[in-house]
Image (tube, helix red, strand yellow):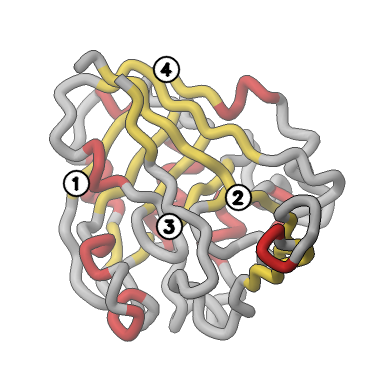
Amino acid sequence: MFVELSYKVEEEMPVYPGLPKDKFQPHTRMARGDPSNTTLVSHFLHNGTHVDAPFHFYDEGQTIDEIPIENFVYERPFLLQKELKKSELIQREDLTSCGDEIRIADILFLYTGYGAFRNNLDIYTDDFPAVSEDAARYIRTELLSLKAVAIDTLSIESATMAPRTDFRVHKTFLDGSMFDTRTLIIYEDVNIQRIVNEKEIKRIYAFPIRLKGLDGSPVNIVAETNE
């Protein structure tokens, strides 16, 4: 069985505070006498369910077309569940209490429960839960089997704290100059709720569009389960 974890891309979807919204512009329409239906899409790469490449916050990092394709397939997913309220953060102790299984995971899903508010733009876009800098450092330097982290909010990083700390959480994951370990890619605005009750997830597929030289991509994340 396959379960989609990406939200549909639409004009009125929630976006990170201050970012431009997507626009769909009809180019040709058969209803107007044109031979086919075609559409021009204006899409901001960090709207909707998307992946951040290292280049997003690291000038020398890989762009989305340079990341090896096998880095988007995951055999050992781990789901951390901690329901959080507005402005609350995932902390280092939330990770250290997970036991040995998290240490062999190749993708870490961070479920805060905040996806339940996605249809309420005022709540979902306002100071949503995120990851603390200390927790990000632990993930980057201690969980060495990980290739990626995914979260069910608009960003891995607090929208209110990020500008004040120079986007330190993003850089902890993506900036190859900060630590002597591999960089991680980040998936944001992921519908993790759909796998919370799954007993066994066999594999995760998260293939991006190969946009040459760019910092991220929309992505369709699919979980393969045994049911």
State how far apart marks 4 and 2 are (Cα).
21 Å
State how far apart marks 1 and 4 are (Cα).
19 Å
Which amino acid does the dot numbered 4 rest on? Answer: Glu
Q: Earlier in the sequence, mark 3 or mark 1?
A: 1
At x 20%, y 35%, the residue is 98
Callout 4 secondary element: loop
Return the residue at label 3.
189
Position of 178 compared to 118: left or right? right
Return the residue at label 4.
75
Q: Position of residue 181 (x, y in %)?
A: 61, 35
Callout 1 secondary element: strand
- Above or below residue 226? Residue 107 is below
Position of 193 compared to 12: left or right? left
Determine crowd level at label 2: few under 14, some 14-19, many 20+ residues with C-alpha closer than 10 A: many
State how far apart marks 2 and 3 are (Cα).
11 Å
Return the residue at label 1.
81
Which amino acid does the dot numbered 3 rest on? Answer: Asp
Q: Of the residues tagged 3 and 1, which is closer to the observer?
A: 3
Q: Position of residue 34 (x, y in %)?
A: 79, 59
Q: Of residues 177 and 125, which is closer to you in this image? A: 125
